[in-house]
Image (cartoon, grey):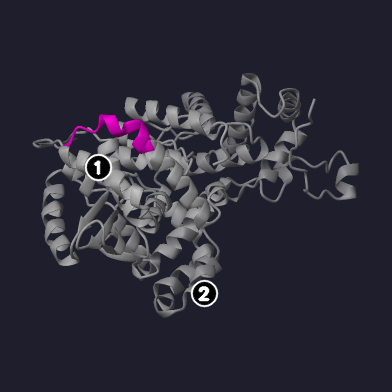
């Protein structure tokens, strides 16, 4: 049986402490313990509990017996151990704390699934936070409240709304945030990036601490004005790399990205071309077939991008109390990638779109803009984010920046072109999140494309 590789316990215990029963080390004597500060927890915090309690020893042994997996009993014991410890300070739980603890569990037991322990609330489908950590917390809270052991008063805040007084950051980190909003606006990128990385946890707490449907890019750009710079996308890249290091390693260089894009896009066209019924979509397919014969890669990529909303059309209805909007294929495509002959004409179109979106309580989300006299002569490529236009050399770079903006800033895909982005997320970036909604078309297509990749090193 292969032994389970668990992190070593690097917590230092003095000889006098270990030799005296009265001064014996316990998890509650660790400097990180004794105060309810789960945001300061590390994997060692949990390891100390595992190695100094009977429940912990059972969990560790269970993991070894099951080759790194935890049985149902061990999962429940782990949840009980952690939640009971959190209650020592009679504090309330938040989604942000549960997210942190769930991620630490995965550090120690990599074969466990994070969503088993925590799934945040999602307003999109009106669901509350779920998972073993949340359910255990609720059960213990209910039991303690029933006998008056803890305060029965309930706060009116959402469960995942974080009070600034609860999560604090170092003076150095707070100073870096101020610097970025002032001196950073006129500083070189080389000076900005170290301070941007230093303030990553602040941004993460701000972004994840608000409802995804109530979060507007304009608010993020207002708090972090340095994103408005022409190189703002480089800062988005930094946050994406910190949030999704495995994806960064998977697509470690541009040739690798191009290789995966070519494989993905060719299979997408192959699987879905017969489903295209729209005349404009059919015309794009004919042009793609002709361009592929000529070997014009840039135009080929432009056509593939324009085709995606027609290959995997989004069928949705956007409702308000009085209005109902069923986006057309043209509207869906325009919310994903749009071709224009000049930016002046685009601004007029965006104003019309903005006014329409206001009626349905939504906003214009990031999308890609391709500028040229026709699709065979694209001169400029942009990602439009919150009235900013980030410039790129090729269409795929613009799409990459647009996708990473959604992920790094934790924003919803537009409802009009949700399927276009979700298939890119699943297949091009091999990324799944707890917010994903899979229609029958996406489930079927994703399954077919995964089957093709099983024996191919892509």
How busy is the neighbourhood of tag 2: few (under 14 within 10 Å), some, or many (20 plus)?
few
Query: How many angstroms separate mark 1 from mark 2 (CA)?
Result: 46 Å
Marker disc for residue 209: none
Q: In the image shown, does 443 or 272 lie closer to the viewer?
A: 272
Residue ID at (57%, 45%):
38
447 inside magenta stretch? no
Q: Secondary structure at mark 2?
A: helix
How busy is the neighbourhood of tag 1: few (under 14 within 10 Å), some, or many (20 plus)?
few
Q: Overall secondary structure of the magenta stretch?
A: helix
Residue 212 image position (x, y, % from top left) = 34, 44
Residue ID at (91%, 43%):
19
Is 112 located above or below residue 164 in the figure? above
Bounds of the magenta span?
Answer: 268-278
Is 46 located above or below residue 249 in the figure? above
Query: Do we see residue 157 in this rendering?
Result: no
Residue 295 image position (x, y, % from top left) = 37, 53
């Amino acid at each position: 049986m292969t032994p389970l590789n668990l992190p070593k316990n690097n917590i230092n215990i003095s000889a006098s402490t270990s030799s005296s029963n009265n001064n014996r080390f316990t998890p509650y004597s660790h400097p990180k313990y004794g105060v309810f500060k789960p945001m300061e927890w590390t994997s060692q915090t949990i390891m100390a509990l595992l190695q100094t309690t009977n429940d912990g020893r059972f969990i560790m042994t269970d993991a070894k017996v099951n080759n790194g997996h935890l049985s149902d009993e061990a999962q429940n014991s782990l949840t009980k151990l952690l939640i009971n410890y959190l209650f020592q300070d009679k504090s309330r739980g938040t989604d942000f704390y549960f997210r942190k603890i769930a991620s630490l569990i995965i550090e120690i037991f990599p074969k466990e699934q994070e969503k088993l322990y925590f799934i945040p609330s999602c307003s999109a489908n009106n669901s509350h936070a779920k998972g073993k950590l949340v359910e255990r917390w609720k059960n213990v809270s209910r039991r303690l409240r029933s006998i008056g052991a803890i305060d029965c008063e309930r706060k009116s805040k959402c469960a995942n709304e974080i009070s600034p007084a609860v999560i604090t950051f170092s003076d150095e980190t707070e100073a870096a945030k101020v610097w970025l909003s002032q001196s950073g606006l006129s500083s070189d990128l080389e000076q900005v990036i170290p301070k941007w990385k230093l303030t990553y946890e602040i941004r993460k707490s701000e972004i994840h601490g608000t409802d995804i449907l109530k979060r507007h890019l304009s608010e993020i750009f207002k708090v972090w004005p340095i994103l408005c710079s022409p190189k703002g996308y480089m800062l988005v890249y930094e946050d994406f790399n910190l949030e999704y290091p495995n994806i960064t390693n998977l697509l470690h260089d541009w040739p690798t990205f191009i290789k995966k894009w070519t494989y993905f896009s060719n299979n997408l066209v192959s699987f879905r071309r017969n489903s295209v019924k729209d005349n404009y979509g059919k015309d794009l397919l004919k042009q793609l077939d002709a361009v592929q014969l000529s070997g014009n890669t840039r135009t080929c990529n432009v056509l593939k991008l324009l085709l995606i909303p027609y290959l995997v059309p989004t069928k949705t209805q956007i409702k308000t109390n009085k209005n109902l909007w069923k986006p057309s294929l043209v509207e869906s495509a325009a919310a994903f990638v749009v071709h224009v002959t000049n930016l002046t004409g685009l601004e007029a179109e965006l104003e019309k779109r903005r006014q329409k979106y206001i009626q349905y309580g939504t906003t214009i989300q990031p999308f890609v803009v391709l500028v040229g006299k026709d699709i065979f002569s694209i001169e400029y490529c942009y990602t439009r984010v919150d009235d900013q236009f980030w410039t790129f050399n090729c269409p795929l770079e613009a799409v990459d920046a647009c996708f990473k903006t959604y992920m790094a800033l934790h924003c919803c895909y537009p409802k009009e072109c949700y399927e276009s982005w979700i298939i890119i997320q699943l297949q091009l970036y091999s990324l799944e999140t707890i917010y994903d909604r899979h229609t029958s078309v996406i489930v079927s297509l994703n399954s077919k494309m995964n089957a093709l990749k099983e024996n191919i090193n892509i």
